[in-house]
């Protein structure tokens, strides 16, 4: 006999009381009957579903782990024998089980009354879009809440919770609206092209949108699984992250390339560079983790090294490989794109070095925010100041590229970023030496 997920079972006992089980469908049925007399029952059931699943359920999925941390009950679950995968589904479905109960009741009535009130559109297609949107909303809310919990044992500020909630609502709206728009339904008055091109291949927009939404849902679920592993003091190898990175490098260039290898490689390198930025700020690393990584490298402990290495390092390796491959060519436009990528890569190394300078500072506060402030100064204020002073030669030392009049023979933007990165690294080494001398 299959054993029910313990967390789903616990939430079922506490959320699905006899009173709730009776009153929820009863109230929804009464509202549907009243709305049916005025011929807008289908719209009313859609609104009830969106309120229950989107507004209420999304908020509940966002706060489920944070509430347990604040109530000091999260440590008991971390010490239990539950696996990260069971915990993921338990928190995702168990915490929102009552909202799904009411939402499915509303959708059942929606399917019955929709053909009586609407002349066009498919009720089942709309229901599928709603369900997918609800799943994306809950999965996104839980994912973003776990992201902002990294390295923070106690969360008291509501800004991070609200940001995670809004992120989940945006994902839910994207999942539902994409399928509805492409489905040619007149229920929302939105239409889209029936066919689309991906890598020059013509595909059905409906099938492609459904596959894309399912892939997004899959990656978010995998992200929740990995983040809960970290909460349970387990280690993750970089293979999950690298798989997601390679997927993005293959998926997104297909929309704006026609199979040309140079453009494809440049686009893939730019995507890898962008995600390297993101993971450098999101991942949790410190001096102890780097020392553990270095010791594992010296001892040839491959498993320990893979667990300890910060995720931005393998991302950078992938970016370097793709950039070097894109350099192999003799066309002038290809070489120009490659030089621009090299320039952006150098400035990215400088920016990550600045992040290390503030994050590795003992007793440093809000290193990511401080880093973003100084990046704004370096990218916006400093070049503008030198530009106003008619010192364009100095201004271009602080910007990675100059479009559209970029000259492939001008190596100043390419070299400048690497020189600045080296200077920041030297500053980090000197600062840490001073710190260890004081500590001894």
Image (cartoon, rainbow, N blue to C red):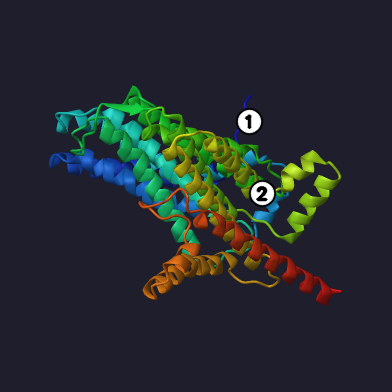
Residue 334: image x %, image y %? Answer: 45, 38
- Look at the image and tell me in which quarter the C terminus lies: bottom right
Residue sticking out furthest to the front? 409
SS category of the residue bearing label 2: helix
Q: Dots 1 and 2: beta carbons under 8 Å? A: no
In this view, 433 is above or below 330:
below
Residue displayed at 49% across by 34% down: 330
- Look at the image and tell me in which quarter the N terminus lies: top right
List the residue tagged with mark 1. Answer: 3
List the residue tagged with mark 2. Answer: 230
Residue 192: image x %, image y %? Answer: 24, 33
Viewer-closest of 68 and 351: 351
Residue displayed at 71% across by 45% down: 235
Residue 40: image x %, image y %? Answer: 17, 41
SS category of the residue bearing label 1: loop
Q: CA distance from mark 1 to mark 2?
A: 26 Å
Viewer-closest of 342 and 191: 342
**Seen in the image, is 169 located left or right of residue 78?**
left
In this view, 317 is above or below 164:
above
- Would you say residue 353 is visible in this rendering? yes
Give the quadrant of residue 42.
top left
Mark with earlier residue (1, 2)? 1
Residue displayed at 63% across by 43% down: 317
Give the quadrant of residue 133.
top left
Residue displayed at 60% across by 57% down: 418
Viewer-closest of 283 and 158: 283
In this view, 392 is above or below 233:
below
Classify 10 Å Cα crowding around label 1: few (below 14), some (14-19), many (20 and above).
few
In this view, 293 is above or below 238:
below
The residue mark sitting in front, 1 or 2, is 2
Residue 282: image x %, image y %? Answer: 57, 54
Viewer-closest of 332 and 18: 332
């Amino acid at each position: 006999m299959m054993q029910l997920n313990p967390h789903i079972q616990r939430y079922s006992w506490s959320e699905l009381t006899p009173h709730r089980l009776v009153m929820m469908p009863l109230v929804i049925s009464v509202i549907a009957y009243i709305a049916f007399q005025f011929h807008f029952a289908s719209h009313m059931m859609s609104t009830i579903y969106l309120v229950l699943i989107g507004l209420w359920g999304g908020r509940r999925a966002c706060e489920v782990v944070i509430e347990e941390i604040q109530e000091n009950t999260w440590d008991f679950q971390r010490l239990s024998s539950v696996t990260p995968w069971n915990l993921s589904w338990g928190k995702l479905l168990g915490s929102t089980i009552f909202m799904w109960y009411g939402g499915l009741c509303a959708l059942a009535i929606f399917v019955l009354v929709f053909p009586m009130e609407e002349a066009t559109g498919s009720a089942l297609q709309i229901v599928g879009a709603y369900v997918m949107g609800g799943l994306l909303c809950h999965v996104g809310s839980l994912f973003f809440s776990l992201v902002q919990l990294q390295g923070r044992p106690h969360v008291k500020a509501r800004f991070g919770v609200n940001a995670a909630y809004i992120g989940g609502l945006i994902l839910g709206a994207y999942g539902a609206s994409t399928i509805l728009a492409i489905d040619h339904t007149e229920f929302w008055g939105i239409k889209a092209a029936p066919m689309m091109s991906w890598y020059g291949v013509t595909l059905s927009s409906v099938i492609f949108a459904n596959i894309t939404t399912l892939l997004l849902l899959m990656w978010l679920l995998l992200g929740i699984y990995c983040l809960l592993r970290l909460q349970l003091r387990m280690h993750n190898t970089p293979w999950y992250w690298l798989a997601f990175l390679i997927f993005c490098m293959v998926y997104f260039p297909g929309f704006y390339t026609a199979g040309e290898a140079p453009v494809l490689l440049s686009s893939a390198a730019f995507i890898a560079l962008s995600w390297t930025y993101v993971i450098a700020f999101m991942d949790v690393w410190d001096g102890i983790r780097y020392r553990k990584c270095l010791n594992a490298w010296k001892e040839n402990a491959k498993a320990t090294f893979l667990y300890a290495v910060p995720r931005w390092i393998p991302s950078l390796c992938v970016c370097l490989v793709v950039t070097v491959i894109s350099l192999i060519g003799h066309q002038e436009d290809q070489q120009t794109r490659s030089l621009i990528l090299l320039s952006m890569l150098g400035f990215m190394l400088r920016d990550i070095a600045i992040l290390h300078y503030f994050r590795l500072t003992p007793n440093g506060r809000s290193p990511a925010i401080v880093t973003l402030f100084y990046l704004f100064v370096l990218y916006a204020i400093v070049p503008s100041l030198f530009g106003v002073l008619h010192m364009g030669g100095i201004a271009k030392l602080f910007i990675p590229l100059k479009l559209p009049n970029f000259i492939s023979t001008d190596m100043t933007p390419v070299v400048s970023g690497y020189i600045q990165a080296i200077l920041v690294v030297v500053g980090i080494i000197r600062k840490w030496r001073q710190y260890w001398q004081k500590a001894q």
